[in-house]
């Protein structure tokens, strides 16, 4: 059984993951809509950073799924 703080951490990680997924979708839409080379480069850098963060939060998903309700 996990400590109560662990449940808070897992809930927070799940929320952060949801926000990251939404932000990634926004960045992808903006990237598809622009032809400016500098903006595209900047958005690609941002997208890389966001996907790395998402991958970190996804490590919590198996723990969240294993938590009893």
Image (cartoon, helix red, strand yellow):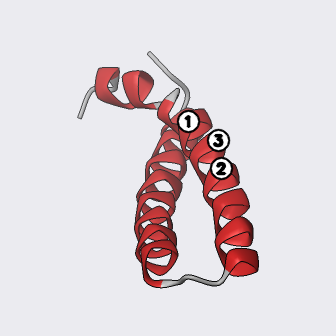
Q: Residue at x 70, y 52 (%)?
A: 49
Question: In the rendered image, which quarter contains the N terminus?
Answer: top left
Residue 46 drawn above or below residue 14 = below
Question: In the rendered image, which quarter contains the C terminus?
Answer: top left
Percent of width and height locating residue 4: 53, 37
* Callout 1–callout 3 Cβ contact below 8 Å: yes
C-alpha span from label 2 to label 3: 6 Å
Q: Nearer the viewer, residue 39 or 60?
A: 39
Percent of width and height locating residue 63: 43, 23
- Tag 1's secondary structure? helix
Q: Nearer the viewer, residue 5 or 45?
A: 45
Q: Residue at x 32, y 20 (%)?
A: 66
* Callout 2–callout 3 Cβ contact below 8 Å: yes
Tell us which disc is closer to us: 1 or 2.
Answer: 2
Q: Which residue is mark 2?
A: 48
Q: Which residue is mark 1?
A: 55
Q: What mark, if any, has residue 1 been given in the picture?
A: none
Q: Nearer the viewer, residue 24 or 20?
A: 24
Q: Quadrant of residue 18?
A: bottom left
Label 1 environment density (alpha carbons within 10 Å; few <14, some 14–19, many ≥20): few
Q: Residue at x 44, y 83 (%)?
A: 33
Percent of width and height locating residue 3: 55, 27
C-alpha span from label 1 to label 2: 11 Å
Residue 52 drawn above or below residue 39 = above
**Numbered label tally:** 3
Tell us which disc is closer to us: 2 or 3.
Answer: 2
Q: Which residue is mark 3?
A: 52
Percent of width and height locating residue 19: 47, 65
Q: Nearer the viewer, residue 18 or 29?
A: 29
Label 2 environment density (alpha carbons within 10 Å; few <14, some 14–19, many ≥20): few
Q: Quadrant of residue 37?
A: bottom right
Specify whether 68 is left or right of 6.
Answer: left
């Amino acid at each position: 059984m996990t400590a109560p703080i662990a449940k808070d951490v897992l809930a927070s990680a799940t929320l952060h993951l949801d926000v990251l997924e939404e932000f990634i979708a926004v960045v992808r839409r903006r990237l598809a809509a622009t032809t400016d080379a500098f903006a595209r480069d900047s958005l690609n850098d941002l997208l890389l950073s966001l996907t790395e963060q998402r991958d970190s939060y996804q490590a919590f998903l198996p723990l969240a799924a294993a938590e009893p309700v």
